[in-house]
Amino acid sequence: MRIDIITLFPEMFDGPFNHSIIKRSIDKNLVEIHLHDLRNYSLKKHKSVDDYAFGGGAGMVMMIEPIDKCIEKLKSERDYNEIIYLSPDGELLGQPMANKLSLCENLILLCGHYKGVDERIREYLITKEISIGNYVLSGGELAAAVLTDSIIRLIPGVLGDETSALSDSFQDNLISPPVYTRPREYKGWQVPDVLLSGNEKEIQEWKLEQSFERTKQKRPEIFKAKMKMNSLNKEYLTCTRKKRNYQK
């Protein structure tokens, strides 16, 4: 996979992209990330890429010409599955979207700034708008880093355990069950006996039960929506009927 990021501040990606899973995926040639400084596409004397808004109003607006020139150059070199604008009013990022984007070969991410971009960019150049939450950031760089991480970790070979990403929260529309490791007992706090039983069937039933209960408690809006699905409702009822008195 190749991800091209158009930004005013490429140095902001030094931290997230030069460590941990993303760096390993780059080193293993599983992904390419290319940063493009938008100011290099400005024809203005001081390399400015913003201007006042027509009609007045506070704040500056990112101009169409530098962004169009950058995207045009990239598209002349390869085909892109999506040209994405990180925007607070875009479609909310969720696991299904990350799953779908992880199957793409080439993506462009545009990081906004100031009061946003010239609307014609959104009308004619962008194919998808994504938000990472219902709040406003100073710029799209942090959102682009979040989106990039959520996509790359799903690419086969990136994680050490190929099945790890499949058991993440939201992959099955439920929050993941609690996890424990050594020591078995700490300050009197115990690991549930079922996890040490070696009984795989009981362990999986316990994990499913915990996922249901945690989703119900922590994310009731997700639980309520998913309970409308008949298959999940039946699964939950079966799980609760089989509920055992496990030590917690």
Image: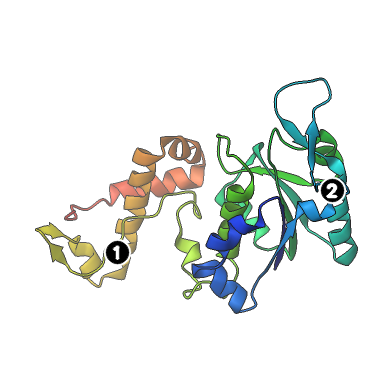
For the point 59% across and 64% down, which residue is it? 152
In the picture of the structure, the residue carrying the numbered disc 1 is: 203
Residue 6 location (% of width, % of height): 73, 54
| Relative to 15, residue 138 above or below | above
Mark 1 → mark 2, Cα distance in angstroms: 56 Å
Residue 237, visible in the rendered structure:
no
Q: Point out the image quarter for the N terminus.
A: bottom right
Q: Secondary structure at mark 2?
A: helix
| Location of residue 90 (image quadrant) | top right
For the point 18% across and 69% down, which residue is it? 183
In the picture of the structure, the residue carrying the numbered disc 2 is: 66
For the point 86% across and 45% down, which residue is it? 44
Residue 65 location (% of width, % of height): 88, 45
- Left or right? Give the position of 120 relative to 110: right
Residue 68 location (% of width, % of height): 86, 48
| Relative to 135, residue 71 above or below | below
| Relative to 25, residue 89 above or below | above
Mark 2 nearby-residue class (10 Å; few <14, some 14–19, many ≥20): many
For the point 49% across and 47% down, which residue is it? 231
Q: Amino acid at mark 2?
A: Pro
Mark 1 nearby-residue class (10 Å; few <14, some 14–19, many ≥20): some
Q: Amino acid at mark 1?
A: Ile
